[in-house]
Image (cartoon, rainbow, N blue to C red):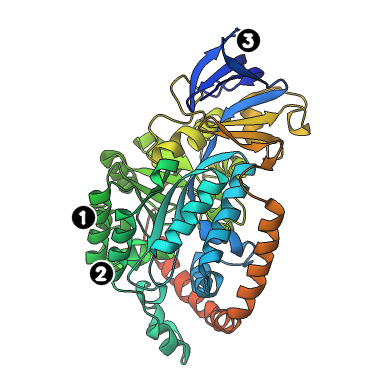
Amino acid sequence: MTKLLLTGARVLAPDALSAPFADLLVEDGRIAAVLPPGTAVADAQAHDARDRLIIPGLVNGHTHGHGGLAKGAGDKWDLAVLLAHAPWISGGRVLQDKWLSTALTAVEMLKKGCTAAFDLSAEFPVPTVDGLDAMAEAYATVGLRAVLAPMVGDLTFFQATPGLIEALPEPHRARAAAMRAASAADILAAIGTAAQSWSHARRDVRLGCAPTIPLHGTDDFLKGCRALAAEHGMRMQTHVAEARYQAAGGEIRYGGATLLEHMDRMGLVGPWFSVAHGVWLTQSDLDLLAKRGAGISHNPGANMRLASGIAPVRAAIRAGVTVGIGTDGSSSSDNQNMFEAMRLAAFASRLWEEAEDEDWLGTAETVRLATVGSSKLLGHEQGGTIEPGHAADLVLLDLRHVNWAPLNDAANQLVWTEDGSAVADVMIGGAWKLRDRKVLGLDEAKLARDAQDAADRLRGANAELRAWCEQVAPHVACHCRALARGWTRSKRLLKAE
């Protein structure tokens, strides 16, 4: 591979506290050296990076590629209402839709400075080899690294939420009760088949396993997911304690144990495992995560959008938990902008009652959560900083853009003023994937046309199902909010101190 020397740029330091001028030598997909400006390198192809700030690629700790076709699906939805609407939001997809939705997600991430993602993908009723291959191919076409983890459960949302079916009026009760997920055996067999034939790791799109929500899985299913992941060396991620009604449902189902404690009893919690959201984790949960070497993806945009709350990030960091940052999917937070996710994470840390400024997330710390922290969730232990030996996953920001006029403090402006619009070029593994704000791997105009055609077709195909979901959603909201209120009254909520 040709040596590439990026010259004349400012380069974000590993601690994210400064951005001195430096030249970067890239060779064989990695950063070979960080050099003083003007250093001569024999046989290197020069790339003029004047007026650029080079930062490590942002890493999305939690998203859903299947959400790409469902942007703006709802308004005043909390998580329970979103799950009630899920059948029509993601229903009726054909193979091309699965590629298309994931490609939309990947393109948006790339254009907003993201180079890797932990994607909890959904197919109903079971994951398929063809579907997972299509989604993996979408990531490879755009050029992003990814952990692609089928999001699975052998219980439906209506079965999984204690008392929900009984709380519905007829005839909704009968229809909800008739809904069935595939069997645990069929789901696990499908993922196992995909794992045995997986060929995308060579392009760093790796297969994972994501039991979607602990309540949505029987104990045998959760154990089976862990066994399968262990057999194939797969990363695992699960939505845990995202909403209060789930925390309440866990204590009802598991005899007073928290959701995480029950998953730990099943053997799921370890260095391979991360929690998505974790808004209502207890201090003992955080201590357990730290003890097991597990992590959390903090997804502040979705947590606010779906009224879930503010995750105890400072308490998690103090407990020793690895923390990353994610956007969540485009049907639950509506964009894939990691700059926005960083900004919201820093903002949210200031809203804890009685929190002092030492409890807040600082800007340099926030940048490291969105790079180093999220990289660890994906299993990239050496990643997220610009240092010799690390992958050349680099984002070049245009310092002539209004977001950077004037340049006063790199870390502060990455979090407070950058919104992705100054992203000019992106390199992944030493290869350009975005040049002059244009994606190199596909035709963006065709992608947009195909997305609109697919959305129009799916809107018609899912119209009857959507109408039913809209009828049942108010009853779902009433029941789940009652569960949540009961749990809150009985608990002393975790504070940031």
Q: Is residue 15 left or right of residue 278?
A: right
In the displayed structure, does residue 9 sit left or right of residue 43? right
Q: Name the residue: 54% across, 32% down.
A: 367
User: Front-most of 211 and 432?
Assistant: 432
The residue to which callout 1 is attached is 265
**Which residue corresponds to mark 3?**
37
Q: Secondary structure at mark 1?
A: helix
Task: Indicate the quadrant where residue 438 lies.
Answer: top right
Marks 3 and 2: CB-CB under 8 Å? no
**Is 247 displayed left or right of 3 in the figure?**
left
Give, as a three-letter code, the residue at label 2: Ala
* 27 in relation to 312, above or below: above
Determine the residue positioned at 24% across, 49% down.
Answer: 230
Task: Estimate the x, y position of residue 53 in percent, counting from the top left.
Answer: 65, 25
Image quadrant assignment for residue 89: bottom right
In x, y percent, where is residue 190?
A: 32, 64
Q: Amino acid at mark 1?
A: Arg
